[in-house]
Image (cartoon, grey):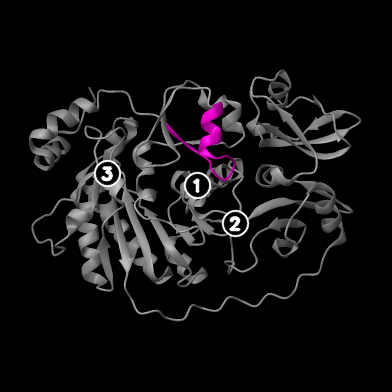
Amino acid sequence: MINLPEKYKERMKSLLGEEYEAYEKSLCEPPVRAFRVNTDKISVEDFEKICPFPHEKIPYCDNGFYFNYDKIGNHPFHHAGMIYVQEPGAMAPAECVDIKPDWTALDMCAAPGGKSTQLKNKLGEKGVLVSNEIIPSRCKILTGNMERLGLRNVITTCADTEKLSRFFHKDFDLIMVDAPCSGEGMFRKEEIAVSEWSEDNVRLCAERQREILDNAVPLLKSGGYIIYATCTFSVEENEMVIDSFLRKYPEFELMEVTPRVRESTCDGISFEGCETENIHFCRRFYPHKSRGEGQFMAVLKSTAEPSPRRPAPKKGKAKENPVVTDFLDSVLTQYDKSNVTVNGDKVNYFTPDFPLPGAYFSCGVTVGEIKKNYIQPHHQFFMAMGKDFRRKIGLDADSPELMKYLHGEEITADTENGWAAVTVNGCTVGGIKVVSGKGKNHYPKGLRLK
């Protein structure tokens, strides 16, 4: 049994009433494990045909599955970015709105990247995602997950949410605010969340959450959506934040979530002084009701009159660099030249019609670095654009050659000389430099199997 703070018990008993015992009992059960199929790399149908471990569909997420398998992070399918391991309750917020594939989206508090990668899967090839994390070390983890999944058209930023409004203005159809919170919903998974809990921390979190929501308002298009989410149960951080927001911003309305999320969650809770009549549209995900940890979510829609977007800075036509062009022509079967940008010695691949912030952590696909008269390709280039490589080395998941590759060793490569993508079941796991039938390993040292 988790040693819950007495004050927390009192609050939850008041919140849940006769359901409290069932909730407390659920905390003694092992956490539920789940993953999402990365549909930017492989379809759900194709993945299920090759999935080597027991799995069961999550009812509210088309590409989400419960699973029970040890060391999934070492599996080749994980290395190839086919899957993202994510707590099932945390998958629910991104499923609250029917997201269109050509939208622009912002995740304001994104690390480690679960909700961001889920959003990007929904945005498809044309949609753009800005994924922000204020802490540099966590932003590095976030960027690494984007890289592993081979996602294109993603910008990662490392900024305070207030500073984001200096970068963007009414640029987004959807904003995810997965706000830092007191973490009550994670008590079963994270002991530190229990030890750090206090009513003072609940109040501090609520103040910070209100500030983050304030900063989201000027970034949203008219008719756009804010999905507000926490992994806590406190009314102060959830319904009270929403009610306060709606009183402050009458141009927003609280919307119902999609039917299947509603069916897997409980109604929001009213409280003394609540002015939002439909506060029950908020949703609560409880571990004794659904398979997963605690989660709260609410959908806010802007009904403001449309206003002009800030014009994007005019971009001059980039002068083609023959070193870059020759490299891409020799490596890829197809690419859009208008997406190629060169900043100093860095080569990136990103949609040209989206306003770039003044500073960013990473932008689009890092193709590589210019070294005098050649390009040193980046791992992200292989992961995001490997399907378009002229040279591919296809290996089976149980292949000894694939294990050698993941350990950083040289492998046999039966193809012409040059850069090649190493694939498993058609999905890129990394790159090699082929010379006379041998593949020089370019899998990053920090990712290799020990």
User: Marks 2 and 3, how far apart in space?
Assistant: 31 Å
The amino acid marked with disc number 2 is Asn
Specify the segment rendered in magenta: 34-50
Residue 403 at x, y percent in the picture: 68, 22
Q: Amino acid at mark 1?
A: Thr
Please tell me whether mark 3 sits on a helix, a strand or a loop.
Answer: loop
Identify residue for label 2: 153
**Taking 35 as reference, is 198 left or right?**
left
Furthest residue in direction right, as rendered: 436
Q: Earlier in the sequence, mark 1 or mark 2?
A: 1
**Total tally of numbered discs in the picture:** 3
Q: Secondary structure at mark 1?
A: helix
- Identified at 24% across, 49% down, the residue is 283
Q: Is residue 45 magenta?
A: yes
Rounded to the nearest angstrom, the CA distance separating label 1 from label 2 is 12 Å
Q: Earlier in the sequence, mark 2 or mark 3?
A: 2
Q: Quadrant of the N terminus?
A: top left
Of residue 308 and residue 44, the one placed in the foreground of this image is 44
The residue identified by callout 1 is 117
Q: Residue at x 48, y 45 (%)?
A: 113
Front label number (3 vs 1): 1
